[in-house]
Image: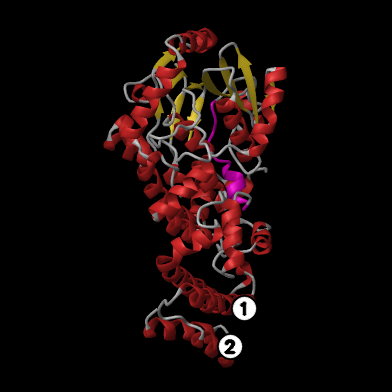
Amino acid sequence: MSTVSVEAHASSLRAAGLSDEHVASWVAAQAQQTTDFETDCAGYARFFHRCDDLLQQLPPKPRRNDAEAAAAGALLASAREHRERFLATHAEALYDRLTRNRSLFLRLDALVMEAATLVPGLTPTRAQLAAEMSGLQRDKDGIEIDQGIFLSHVLASERAGTHLCHAMLLPRPEAVELLPQLAADGRVDLGAATVERRSRAVHVTMANARFLNAEDETTLELTELAVDLAILDPATDIAVMRGGVLEHPKYRDRRAFGAGINLTHLYRGRIPFLWFMERDLGYVHKLLRGVARPESVPDDVHGRGIEKPWIAVVDGFAIGGHCQLLLTMDYVLAASDAFMTLPARKEGIIPGLANLRLPRFTGDRIARQAIQYERKLPCDSPEGRLICDEIARPDEMEAAIARVIERLSNAGAVSAIGNRRALRIGEEPLDLFRRYCSAYARDQAYCAFSPALIANLERNWDAHNRAV
């Protein structure tokens, strides 16, 4: 940080009523450059501690006056500048230390918690996260942005980022434990999703009936378990994903693929930043690339993961995150009255990997119109058919599903998997995915805690008046 910036921030702190002694101590703790890893871990941690100590002397965000808000902004900004500097130099060394030179696979949630222990203040602790989760999104200081900065630097490293992607593609242990139940009963009901064998196909049904099958903090882990189970099931050759029957009065007893993220929960502060990353590096990536094995890097020519072709069945609508899922599928069957949207502009967030994937289907212009200008894509339209492979009447969907499964599976699983892998390696190699997610981690973190997000949700969603 430049001398001018330090002095400007120090002036903000004094204007908020922080003592000269505390401000001087904060200024003295500034780290102007990086040195060796061990020295910087200690030095930068001291600065993060000073920033947090001063932040705690200010009132909570909803009760701050203008001077106090400016001081909080100065403390948060200076700490983030230090995190960027530390990680630009030490991200790989830090990741190697956390994973024992990449011999240990840590999922995202475990990784950010271990980082908070090794370099205190680099990422928030579990206690700090719990305290922020108790408030509305607008009332948070956005300490989860620090997780986004950390993950962005890890994913920017080819060595560390590839290993992290690999870790997130491994099957969850709970899914492996459920395989005997699926074998014995032919069905596993996880609540937010069910997995059911029907002949040589395994069907995953997403179920959040009260909220139009929307995704939130209650559905993510269970959906990933369902996807793992479907992929790992040795008795089936093809997987089908469909939305369940809804309870909403407007759509009662009708199916819908899904309404994307639960915006009310987002507004209420219930969906953490890490949710976005775990979703896209977890089950959504598994739909595209399959489940990895520990000894084999995904798509490595010397090894193979475990994967199946996926069919998406779109009833009603595929909005936001559910539209994103269609871009990972091998085949999309849609009802003639269904539609797709990516209302990212109305929400104020980035629509996952859609920015990377949608142009491959629709071209750049339609992709920009869908993402930036809310263009609605009826499934049974020239533009919709660029994403949807087949259209059927709503009353003929069951017969159409059976026909598609038979047609896609009668040539055998080996060639189907080989062909999808070959297409994937050409279109979206793991390195491209990793580099996109590096940018996505930082940008989505800032979006999630932007005042614009709150304004968008209040204006376009009437979020403050909706029942949870």
What range of the chain is rendered magenta? 257-269
Q: Residue furthest bottom?
A: 21
Q: How many marks?
A: 2
Residue depicted at x 63% and y 40%: 221
Q: Mark 1 belongs to which amino acid?
A: Asp
Crowding near the residue tagged with mark 1, few <14, some 14–19, many ≥20 C-alpha atoms within 10 Å? some
Residue depicted at x 43% and y 18%: 414
Q: Mark 1 = which residue?
A: 53
Q: Is 397 or 151 nearer to us in this picture?
A: 151
Say which quarter of the image contains residue 214: top right
- Are dots 1 and 2 in contact, CB under 8 Å? yes
Residue depicted at x 55% and y 27%: 231
Is residue 403 covered in magenta? no
Q: Mark 2 = which residue?
A: 22
The image shows residue 349 at horizontal and vertical percentages of 46, 49
The image shows residue 447 at horizontal and vertical percentages of 46, 55
The image shows residue 462 at horizontal and vertical percentages of 56, 46
The image shows residue 440 at horizontal and vertical percentages of 42, 51
Q: Is 88 or 355 nearer to us in this picture?
A: 88
Is residue 261 covered in magenta? yes
Q: Main secondary structure of the magenta part?
A: loop
Crowding near the residue tagged with mark 2, few <14, some 14–19, many ≥20 C-alpha atoms within 10 Å? some
Residue depicted at x 57% and y 62%: 115
Q: Secondary structure at mark 2?
A: helix
The label shown at residue 168 is none
**In the depicted structure, whether residue 36 falls above or below residue 463:** below
Q: Mark 2 belongs to which amino acid?
A: His
| Residue 94 appears in the rendering | yes
Q: Quadrant of the N terminus?
A: bottom left
Q: Is residue 221 left or right of residue 397?
A: right
Distance between the alpha carbons at the discs numbered 1 and 2: 9 Å
| Residue 190 appears in the rendering | no
